[in-house]
Image (tube, rainbow, N blue to C red):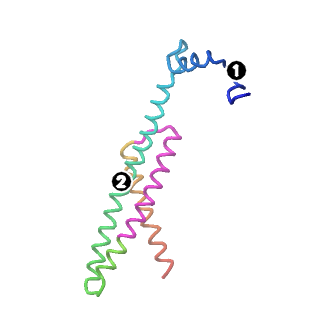
């Protein structure tokens, strides 16, 4: 009866030697398995860290914009019967929508930087995060003006 390893060239005694060779260092100076795994983990950490910083800048700038707009809405709707409820609902929905969009676009930006092999400076994260919020504001205003 043939098993699933019968098509391989390696005999039972050659397989442990191959595994030990992959795990250990070799004479050519090629990286071993542990070094490769450490590099992949470092790249993954760098990618998530880039996305994290872009997202944080997007989060804080979005909080600033939605906080300012919420205060403006409270002042303008202070005499309205349900003005506080309207303000709370609209600011919450707007902030949650920009939060979800910020997570997705921050991950996409970090992925592009990782594929390109570039590092991200803190100022780039600031520009990209605030740029995401600015684009969100411009798109929101253009949709409102289109309905008038």
Position of residue 75 relative to residue 34, above or below, is below
Q: Is label 2 in a helix, a strand or a loop?
A: helix
Label 1 crowd bin: few (<14), some (14–19), many (20+), radius 10 Å: few
Position of residue 147 relative to residue 14, above or below, is below
Q: Residue at label 2?
A: 57
Position of residue 71 relative to residue 109, above or below, is below
In three-dimensional space, the C-alpha distance between marks 1 and 2, rounded to whole angstroms, equals 54 Å
Q: Residue furthest front?
A: 1
Q: Relative to 10, is 24 on the left or the right? A: left
Q: Residue at label 1?
A: 9
- Picture residue at 31% right of the left edge, 63% below the top: 64
- Picture residue at 49% right of the left edge, 43% below the top: 113
Position of residue 92 relative to residue 81, above or below, is above
> Start and end of the magenta stretch?
92-120
Residue 35 x %, y %:
47, 25
Residue 69 x %, y %:
32, 71
Q: Residue furthest top?
A: 27
Kindly identify which numbered label has been placed on residue 100: none
**Principal SS element in the magenta part?**
helix
- Picture residue at 25% right of the left edge, 83% below the top: 78
Circle 1 or circle 2, nearest the eye: 1
The disc, 1 or 2, on the residue closer to the chain's N-terminal end is 1
């Amino acid at each position: 009866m043939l098993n699933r390893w019968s098509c391989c060239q390696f005999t039972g005694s050659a397989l442990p030697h191959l595994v030990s060779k992959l795990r250990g260092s070799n004479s050519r100076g090629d990286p071993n398995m542990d070094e490769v795994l450490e590099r992949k983990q470092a790249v993954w950490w760098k990618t998530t860290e880039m996305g994290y910083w872009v997202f944080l800048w997007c989060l804080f700038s979005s909080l600033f914009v939605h906080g300012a707009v919420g205060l403006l809405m409270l002042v303008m709707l202070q005499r309205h019967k349900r003005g506080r409820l309207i303000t709370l609902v609209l600011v919450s929905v707007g902030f949650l929508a920009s939060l979800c969009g910020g997570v997705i676009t921050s991950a996409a930006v970090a992925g592009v930087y990782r594929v390109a092999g570039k590092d991200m400076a803190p100022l780039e994260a600031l520009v990209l995060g605030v740029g995401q919020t600015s684009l969100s504001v411009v798109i929101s205003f253009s949709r409102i003006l289109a309905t008038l």
